[in-house]
Image (spheres, helix red, strand yellow):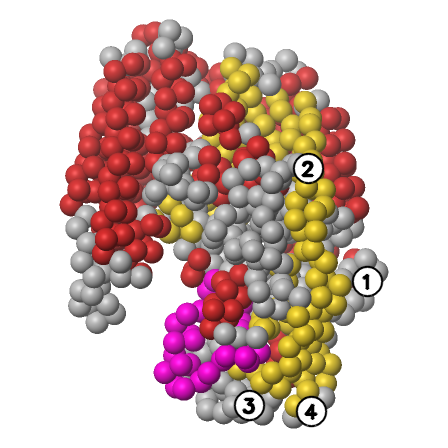
Amino acid sequence: MTLANRKQPRSSQRSRRKIRSALSACSAVAFAVAIVAGLAAACRQPAPRGAPPPRLGFSSAAFEKQRDLEQRFRSSVSAEELGTFHAMVTREPHMAGTDGSRDVAEYIRGALAAAGLNVEVIEYQAYLSFPTTVAVDIVAPIAQRLRVTEPASAIDRDTQNPRLGPGFVAYSASGDVTAPVVYVNYGLPDDYAQLAARNVDVRGKLVIARYGHSHRAVKLHTAEHAGAAGILIYSDPADDGFVRGETWPKGYWRTHDQIQRGNAKYSWFWHGDPLTPGVAAVQDAVRQDPAQAPTLPRIPAAVLSWGEARKILERLDGVPVPPGFQGGLPITYRVGGGAVRARLRVQMDNGLRTIRDVVARVPGARQADREVILGTHHDAWTFGGVDPGTGTAALVELARTLGALRRGGWQPQRTITLAFWDAEEFGLIGSTEYAEDRLRALRDGAICYINTDLYMNGPLDAGGTPSLRDFLVEVTLDIPDGSGTLYDGWRGEKDLKSLGSGADFVPFQDFVGLPTLSIEFNATGGYTYGPYHSNYDTRFFVEQVADPGFQRGAQLVRVLGTTALRLGESQILPFRFSHYARRLAELIDTASTWGFGEDGRRTFQVDLTSAKDAIARVAAQANIVERRIDDRLAAPLGDDVPASNTRRVNDALARLEQRLLDDNQQWYRHVIYGWNIYSLYDGQPFPGLAEAIRVRDADRARKEVGRIVAALNRLSDGMREISELMS
């Protein structure tokens, strides 16, 4: 779709240039329109009989062979096999650090070995957190024990498993607190500010907050700094329940009994093991004292279903809540005037436990030391029916199909690696420890990291590095889906969302600096669904609601595999930095609005002229590089691209993302992308600058602009070096 073929009629070449223009020059909204128009125009032109449309990274003849390989791969994907794998990885509860997690890791190892892949199991000693005691009691105006467990269901036998435990917050502090209860909405800084403006004092109180709008760790941290003695978190039906739609067992939303577990590690300091920043958590690693580690909360926390939380909320006295605080329960939400008192008791068992990453490879034929990595995780809070059983099973099925191709005589040009991380639920520990352990090898040899955490029966939900947007568009256009293609059902505006946090792409994007993708299907439009992190996240829910027949899972395998095969086989890596430059320009325009208040008046001044100039230099160099790559692939020798300096070009292309890192930073090293902790898992462009503006620090803001300009200059210099290699 993107390369001009000299053997084609000029009219067809012009049509393909229109498509390239749509991929490269349009805004997100105009892009969707332009590409459809371009495709229609291309389809009206005669094409040489049997000639496939070329794709990024391939000459026409090379892609004809590639297309045959991809079609053979996609036709071999089996929903039935995927369902069998899913049954095995969800048959028992398997929290990281438990025997169940060890058993699942061993099953995955065996399945990968049976598929014919080269497998290794890598162990780390991670600091994990388990509950010994979790109890919540109303002590006034009545005495009532609240349930912190989930009742078993007669229609889902898995929920009756005796190994299932209570809902809990990993890394909660241990403590015993009896205090008046105050409702704090989502428990974010603005919520506390609104309460303070109404003379509501939370110091020494037990606060109750609803899930949503941020990670639970942000709610703990904010409560801790506000002086609260402890926190209860519940799922309000306005955010995740009957207000949103049909509830379990027929729909995607949470019932009054279902509890959301999770970790509360303060991962904005660093991800992974909470005691070993920047280094692998091996047996003899130097560890921080848990009592001093900034990643660990200092107040106790517990989680409740909305059915149990209602018993507190409906008894709260005091004034009605401020605007935006009202939830979905049919009661008048009140702040709490002291009439309701509750007792929270938490005792945690924290310590080092063995976790196991399972990593398998299909070695490359020509470049075994260059790898395309696909990852998911295998640990779960309970059974992990959707999270992560769907993603785990999909990657095992991908291993089976790649193994079959390998037995048939195929071998990729570059190594394809499949990784199954442990302890993701405790804060991306398995993936982060691996990235820290093998940092140099990854920076030298990894081409791309592709993550899939879970999927549901919904549209494509994709995020990642802008340099991979055009490439993924082409992949989705080539995969049939229903009466059209996968591209047609792509959620949103056919662009890659910025990746912030919440899944195992984080260490590879923010610490290693790899080009990164997240590819999933999402039915709810966000990172939640009713049984999420509950005892009800079982195979039953997947079979009844999330993916009956595992057909959507098979489609996920096809898109993941096609992506990996194309990256593994391309003659020249299909990165497009002209789109990256346009995305940077959009982001810097957005950043220019951060200094304005809600009334439209400027409240903070920052000069972004130098950053805009640097982006213009990136755009100019990107256009030169892409033109020379396209010319080389379209040349008469393009079908056999000379190897003299192509490897050097590919290595330089793969390393361009690393030029956007600032290694003077401790862990979050990416200058352009980070995590907005106050919007759940969303990506935050220019995270250092955003924080400087948020705290109104003019000197810090100037320094952050300097960091941005330096990173962009490194990027344009890198592209200039590539253009010289190709001249």
Percent across and percent down for residue 208 are 56, 76
Secondary structure of the residue carrying numbered label 1: helix
- Disc 4 vs disc 1: Cβ atoms closer than 8 Å? no
What is the C-alpha distance between the residues marked 1 and 2? 37 Å
- Disc 1 vs disc 3: Cβ atoms closer than 8 Å? no
Q: Nearer the viewer, mark 2 or mark 4?
A: 2
56 above or below 676?
above
What residue is shown with label 4?
142
Percent across and percent down for residue 319 are 46, 91
Seen at 25% across and 69% down, the residue is: 598
First reached walking from the N terminus: tag 2 or tag 4: 4
What residue is shown with label 3?
338
Relative side of 197 to 563, left or right: left
What residue is shown with label 1?
160
First reached walking from the N terminus: tag 1 or tag 2: 1
Is residue 500 or residue 338 the one in the foreground? 338
Which amino acid lies under the numbered mark 4 shown in the image of this protein? Ile
First reached walking from the N terminus: tag 4 or tag 1: 4
Is residue 9 or residue 152 the one in the foreground? 152
Q: Residues within 10 Å of mark 4 (few under 14, many from 20)?
A: few
Secondary structure of the residue carrying numbered label 2: loop
What is the C-alpha distance between the residues marked 2 and 3? 49 Å
